[in-house]
Amino acid sequence: MGILRLSHVDITVPDMDLARAYYTGVMGLDLTDETADRAFFKCWDEEDHHSLAVRYDPRVGLDRFAFKVEHEDDLADLERKVEQYGFHVDRVSRGAEVGQGESIRFETPSGHEMELVFDVEKVGGRTSKLNPEVPVDLLGIAPPRMDHLLINAEEVGEMTKFCMDVLGFRMTEQLVGGDGHQIGTWMERSHSPHDLAVVNGPNGALHHFAFWLDDWDHVRRSADILAYNAIQIDVGPTRHGVTRGNTIYFFDPMGTRNEVFTGGYRPDPDFPTITWTEDNIGQAVFYYEGEINDRFVSVHT
Amino acid sequence: MGILRLSHVEVRCPDLELSTAYYTEVMGLIETAVEDDKAVYLKGWDEQQHHSLILRYAPTYGVELVAFKVAEAGDLDELTAAVEGYGIATKRFAAGELGPGSGETVRFTAPSGHVTELVHGMEQIGNALPLHNPPPEPLGLSGMHPPRLDHVFLMCEDVDETTRFFTDVLGFRLTEQIVADDGHQLATFLERTHTAHDIAFITGPDGAFHHVAYWVDDWNDLRRSADIAAYHGVRIDAGPTRHGATRGWGLYFFDPAGNRNEVYTGGYWADPDREPITWTEAQMGRAVFYYEGVVDQDFLTVHS
């Protein structure tokens, strides 16, 4: 029935050892696979092969992001729709990519490489399928799963239209400029406030990807862990007006912005879109502070 | 698309005034409509649709019906055909026919003996917030004020058969099960919303009601809910505690009529291809109450 949820984010890092140390020791992810120049991570409650892939490159950046579709037929269906919209689609055959089978890749109007995948290798979660215990031996922040990502686009309206009309995303919230154009949009497929958000900025850029936490207390504990490990916190712990979630933003040691996120709401497909006006942008993004720092607006990878 | 989620639950109560006072002031739901001396309609503050709970005047307690929201109008026809194909008669009601706010509805009795409805197009009345620059939550709400309905837990004699009906005919997916030593299902947990459960069944009399659960945002809300229940002299049944099954946290208590309520949080995201978890009969205590490790007899035997 189309796109199910975010599958994985593939980033580049200039220091693989540092990336491994941070994403396992501080973030508390499981290292599931490695090749000569790549490492694959997943959260403890995720059953799929990976939700984060890092690749060595002298520059910090984003290779692509991938969404998981619900049925095998969805790949062909969405491939046709993307091609009809006028974009070239590449098929990645089974065996060509680590941890997953066939997929499709294409460039979005925002200049990002996007991937859709159905057949992901299952490696299983940390807990048993028979009388499972709640895990108590987790290191670091240890989020149970990946949640969403936020990308930049020069033309937010165009990218949003593509995501909605072609890929079937639903818009839960939007931030609208005084002249009526969209400055930011938040879209979902998983009946959560957002799986993908787009905010005005350079094409192809990543603003952040976010891991899910169970509650505000876990957010507080994450801030303690980040501070202990001398990780640069960007903003928070605080609340978003948009999505109504609670959050901390911080940078991995290579410079990619991470978020831990909890809360929000469960929108039905007939959920009426919430609109934020430009004069309320501060509260929309950081509800407690009521203003956005320059770094949050200008730093992306 | 099929069933989207649990839409609403209708419970019986012999004293409508008392139950309404409890559900609005202790539970903190919002009253949306009243049918004099007959029924009261309520919803959680963040719900967009007209109601998620109906209190129906009756000389006794228990559950009158459970209703699920379908994603598209065409799903009603498709699911009607599937239910009738299973050999169960259905009855159709036009929007508005079943009371204030009601959508187009298909009604039938599930193999568990529960009146079950599928609904499309219930009136949308909006949550308690504006659609422009909304604050994250309204201030001044009473009691526990959960944002929304989460799941319902029912009893039936043959959990295996009921589970087959809900999975094969209605398209639910099994997330967890408690299996007896002889192999039959003592309890099953089923979902449509990619959560740990939207409905669950446990062995007991057909048609019996175990509890209805509202969602709260976190563990701290459960503590506050327990304070509110205790303050109002509401009888707490169990918790705050952790469930082994669903991995959520819960607090159980009774409404004035004797219907069990829960406030619930936590759990996990379940992909449609997530393999179900099995609990063995020997571990049933931890499956239900993970911290205590035993299920008290009241919890298994008291229902409405």
Image (cartoon, coloured by chain):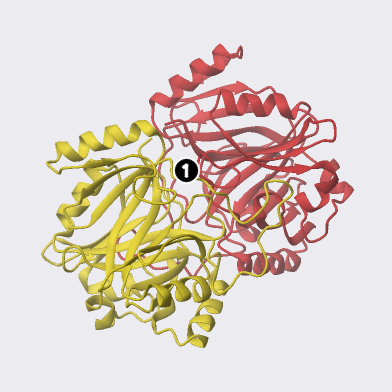
Chain colours: A red, B yellow
* Residue A112 shows up from this direction: no
Of all residues shown, which one is farthest toward the front? Answer: B36
Image check: B256 left or right of A89? left
> Percent from the top left, x then y, of residue B187?
24, 63
> Percent from the top left, x then y, of residue A180?
80, 31
B66 shown above or below A140 = above
Label 1: how many Cα within 10 Å (few below 14, some 14–19, many 20+) = many
Q: In the rendered view of the protein, which quadrant contains the C terminus of chain B? A: bottom left
Q: In the rendered view of the protein, which quadrant contains the N terminus of chain B? A: top left
Compare residues A237 and A193 and report the one nearer the observer: A193
Answer with the quarter of the image where residue A233 lies: bottom right
A262 shown above or below B37 = above
Image check: A198 left or right of B196? right
Compare residues B297 and A294 and report the one nearer the observer: B297
Answer with the quarter of the image where residue B291 lies: bottom left
What type is the residue that disc 1 sits on? His
Q: Secondary structure at mark 1?
A: loop
Chain label for disc 1: A
* Residue B114 shows up from this direction: yes
Residue in the image at 45% along x and 20% along y: A77
Residue in the image at 38% along x and 33% along y: B73
**Which residue is identified by label 1?**
A49
A68 shown above or below B233 = above
Compare residues A50 and B151 and report the one nearer the observer: B151
